[in-house]
Image (cartoon, coloured by chain):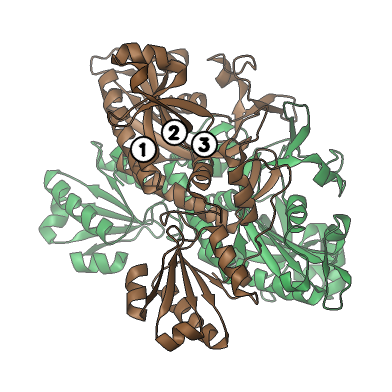
Chain colours: A brown, B green
């Protein structure tokens, strides 16, 4: 894409009321727009990052045979009353509104209850099990404070997945498969090395649930970590977990983290509460086991923006960057060669942001750094004379002069 | 995809409170689930249709250089007060709710005002114009009645696009380009021949706006049509339009239609109300011209479901069908050959629904018809003996015996 066709601009300053680094950078780079605290629009480059993250998550959920669907924001009161979770004292993040006939409805902050209710239509027999389904849904949560940018929104995108099983063992197996799929997701998102499967406060059925926690100073959580043994414990369950695992607190390192995923084993509690049963091979009615698995898509984008950025701006991993290459031409002769390279790279399906603006080179370089595009290619009289292209890595800052063939090989 | 991996089931009956044919068929075929009146979840097959429609719209919006973004559901009161449209007497479809601090917020039923507000950040000079942007957004509209299935939802997906121009002429040109892009969309969706650019009640700037109206008995509108002259007029403006065009009512045919798109020329009214101006080459401040262009994505899916279906069920055009082929094997020998064909077609990127269930053939045939998959391939002892495959077209009902090569050529 040519920058001249993009309506966004980089900004020198973020809005003065924006205190979170992730949102400051994303706003300045033209990736998001702040509608109100905790509510952000995603502009073309931000939407690309979001869709790239969703694509990776979608591919990994597909490997564990989950079906994608999309539930609704508007929610019926009766469904949530079955589990007492309509009550604002039980769930304090509801947004509620009313239909014209004065019927009260809620805006989905989670979809556990409506999914279980819906599955009554599709699960009758043991032959219908197991089932796993997921969605990318815009959730609404009426947070009292929303000061963490896109890391904690009042309106945000979540991947939530639900699995239904005939036995505790089958759920357990799927739960473990999901842990592996989540690890692959975080690896592909470039934060795998600093993301830990962490013991956290339990679901209904198990002593502990599992969170995926990523080390970052911007995090709101504290975990205790044993890197060598790959053990991580949320401080909220530290005493119980130490006892359970037979380790000493002194062996553990205390770090700040952000939660990027969580998974729960609900056992049969929710299905029992909501009257979802299946008929077994024995002809009898049985309780169903369910698991619930979340990844905050916009949140993880915020964590990556915080964690991988530097003093020049964002640094996207190639897997989710809105483009792979930022192309800058300096001078008229360079422009013609840049036009040509732009077409060649585009034809090779390599995404390029081509800075074709009438701007000074320093501004273009600064924008490419602020936007965090993995590679910058610079063409100038000097590079043309040398018969080379200048390739700069955003992450390392390293610059190399490459021939045309070397450049294409490197970028393909 | 194997049907055994799909959690949905076809249903003999739609819910008794569902009166719209489109929703009855889509629910029975397992494409949508009714959460409440006017609020539907999209199950895996329904989501595929929706995404296919979005892909086509996205490709065509890209040809007219529009940038995709995504705005927010939660909306600030102050923005809408600038145009008086916060007032429930002016706009009677608002859902409103409150933040924890009691600030009143709305749920987006349109995004004209927030887009104009946002663009104050990005449009300053004539050099920033023209700009076009669009989104696929889940809109909320508090409809008094919602009895048309997915054709009129309280929660629905809309593609809304907005263009900003320095001059009336530039807007006019873009408006006409958009009409052509919309025509291509409806052609690709399989309803082009019965969709008419229709004079409708005007925006702020022009006597008439334009709707895209598709002939269907399920429609809520009435238009007057001259097929040969390609003139269509919504009954709401019939007298004015007859005068303007110098034609007689007796020349026109009266037909029922459903609106599948609409476009407005707002002139400078909205930008003036909201204080969005640009600095011209002359250094002076000028008013901006804007156009607004909508396609109801879920609505058009409903219209297609109504219009192209028959007494056996849905009939999707190939361009948006959730799969191209429904594969049925009858007997054990056939199953082995079907497995092989399934792999071959999948490798060739041809989407197949493989009915691998332990069901009688009649049920499988009925389901393939209800789901509206364009082609059914049947393999049986008889076809194996003949060295052929049986290919049945959903639309024509025509069946042919084809060799392996002929089949692949036909489906590729």
Looking at the image, can residue B335 be seen? yes
Q: Are marks 1 and 2 in contact (CB under 8 Å)?
A: yes
Q: Residue at x 86, y 74 (%)?
A: B283
Q: Earlier in the sequence, mark 1 or mark 3?
A: 1
Residue at image mark 2: A261
Number of labels in the image equals 3
Instruction: Classify residue B291 as left or right of residue A205.
Output: right
Helix, strand or loop for disc 1: helix
Q: Is A70 left or right of B134, judged from the image as shown?
A: left
| Label 1 crowd (10 A; few <14 / some 14-19 / many >=20) | many
Q: Nearer the observer, disc 1 or disc 3?
A: 3
The residue lying toward the viewer, choosing from B293 and A252, is: A252
Mark 3 against mark 2, which lies toward the viewer?
Answer: 3
Check disc 3 and report the residue beneath it. A217
**On the same chain: label 3 and label 2?**
yes
The chain carrying label 3 is A
Residue located 45% across and 55% down the image: B316
Dividing the picture into quadrants, the one containing residue A66 is top left
Distance from label 3 to label 2 (Cα)?
A: 17 Å
Q: Earlier in the sequence, mark 3 or mark 2?
A: 3
Q: Which residue is mark 1?
A: A182
Q: Name the quarter where the C terminus of chain A is drawn.
A: bottom left
On the image, the x and y values in percent for residue B211 come to 71, 61
User: Horizontal and vertical percent for residue B362?
Assistant: 29, 42
Foreground residue among B94 and A102: B94
């Amino acid at each position: 894409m040519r920058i001249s066709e993009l309506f966004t601009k980089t900004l020198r300053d973020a809005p003065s009321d924006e205190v979170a680094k992730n949102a400051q950078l994303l706003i300045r780079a033209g990736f998001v727009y702040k509608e109100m605290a905790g509510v952000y629009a995603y502009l073309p480059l931000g939407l690309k990052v979001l869709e790239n993250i969703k694509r990776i998550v979608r591919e990994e959920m597909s490997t564990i045979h989950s079906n994608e669907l999309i539930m609704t924001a508007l929610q019926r009161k009766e469904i949530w009353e079955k589990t007492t979770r309509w009550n604002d004292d039980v769930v304090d993040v509801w947004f509620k509104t009313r239909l014209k006939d004065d019927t009260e409805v809620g805006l989905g902050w989670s979809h556990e209850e409506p999914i279980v209710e819906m599955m009554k239509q599709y699960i009758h027999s043991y032959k219908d099990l197991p089932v796993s389904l997921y969605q990318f849904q815009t959730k609404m949560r009426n947070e009292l404070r929303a000061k963490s940018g896109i890391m904690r929104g009042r309106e945000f995108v979540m991947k939530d997945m639900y699995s239904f099983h005939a036995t505790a063992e089958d759920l357990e197996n799927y739960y473990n498969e999901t842990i592996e799929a989540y690890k692959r997701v975080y690896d592909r998102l470039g934060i795998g090395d600093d993301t830990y499967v962490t013991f956290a406060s339990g679901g209904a059925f198990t002593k502990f649930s599992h969170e995926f926690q990523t080390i970052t100073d911007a995090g709101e959580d504290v975990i205790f970590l044993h890197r060598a043994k790959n053990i991580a414990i949320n401080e909220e369950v530290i005493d119980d977990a130490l006892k359970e695992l037979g380790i000493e607190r002194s062996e553990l390192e205390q770090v700040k983290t952000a939660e990027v995923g969580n998974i729960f084993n609900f056992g049969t509690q929710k299905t029992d509460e909501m009257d979802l049963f299946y008929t077994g091979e024995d002809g009898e009615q049985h309780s169903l086991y369910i698991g619930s698995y979340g990844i905050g898509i916009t949140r993880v984008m915020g964590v990556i923006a915080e964690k991988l950025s530097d003093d020049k701006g964002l640094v996207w991993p190639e897997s989710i960057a809105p483009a792979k290459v930022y192309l800058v031409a300096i001078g008229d002769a360079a422009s013609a060669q840049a036009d040509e390279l732009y077409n060649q790279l585009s034809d090779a399906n390599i995404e390029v942001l081509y800075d074709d603006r009438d701007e000074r080179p320093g501004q273009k370089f600064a924008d490419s750094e602020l936007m965090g595009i993995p590679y910058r290619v610079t063409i100038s009289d000097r590079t043309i004379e040398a018969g080379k292209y200048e390739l700069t890595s955003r992450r390392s800052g390293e610059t190399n002069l490459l021939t045309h063939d070397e450049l294409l090989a490197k970028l393909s």
